[in-house]
């Protein structure tokens, strides 16, 4: 039964870490904004498109119009839920190995689920606090 409490508490912590990392610190003029912008430029969803006034003899960059690595951008920094889920999955495994505890699939699922759910709550609280 202690594995459920462990998964719950670790999920709350992972949700908080993911919110701070992917919501707060990636805002403009914050510590990780450069990291976010660099990843967005390299593998993120934003891409420039050819406009009507672009001369045809100028070749566009190779990555325009091609699918980008959004599957990598989201879990790294682009999606708080994805970051929280990844943190919950991997930190639970790391904590189990470090503590030499028995593995529990229910604790693992609880940790990942709670971290995804709580990052939404933390992000809403943060957005509300910015308005006030």
Image (tube, rainbow, N blue to C red):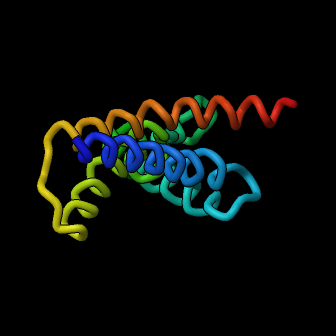
Residue plotted at (17% across, 61% down): 101
Which image quadrant: the C terminus? top right
Q: Position of residue 61 (x, y in %)?
A: 45, 52
Which image quadrant: the N terminus? top left
The correct choice, above or below, for 109 with respect to 14 in the image is above
Q: Nearer the viewer, residue 40 or 14?
A: 14
Q: Position of residue 75 (x, y in %)?
A: 37, 47
Q: Where is residue 60 in the image (x, y as percent from the top left)?
A: 47, 48
Which residue is situated farthest in the front direction here?
1
Q: Position of residue 89 (x, y in %)?
A: 27, 48
The correct choice, above or below, for 40 with respect to 97 in the image is above
Residue plotted at (58% across, 55% down): 37
Whether residue 38 is visible to the viewer of this picture, yes or no, is yes
Residue plotted at (29% across, 36% down): 110
Whether residue 63 is visible to the viewer of this picture, yes or no, is no
Q: Quadrant of residue 130?
A: top right
- Horizontal side, residue 106 vs residue 71: left or right: left
How many discs appear?
0
Residue plotted at (41% across, 46% down): 9
Q: Which of 13 and 35 is in front in this view?
A: 13
Which residue is situated farthest in the right direction here?
132
């Amino acid at each position: 039964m202690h594995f459920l409490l462990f998964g719950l508490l670790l999920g709350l912590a992972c949700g908080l870490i993911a919110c701070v990392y992917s919501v707060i610190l990636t805002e403009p003029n914050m510590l990780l904004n450069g990291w976010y912008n660099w990843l967005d430029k390299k593998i993120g969803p934003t891409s420039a498109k050819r406009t009507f006034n672009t001369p045809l003899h100028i070749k566009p960059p190779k990555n325009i119009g091609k699918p980008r690595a959004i599957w990598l951008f989201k879990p790294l920094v682009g999606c708080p839920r994805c970051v929280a889920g990844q943190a919950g999955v991997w930190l639970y495994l790391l904590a189990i190995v470090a503590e030499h505890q028995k593995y529990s699939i229910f604790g693992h699922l609880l940790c990942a689920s709670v971290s995804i759910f709580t990052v939404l709550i933390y992000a809403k609280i943060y957005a509300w606090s910015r308005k006030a």
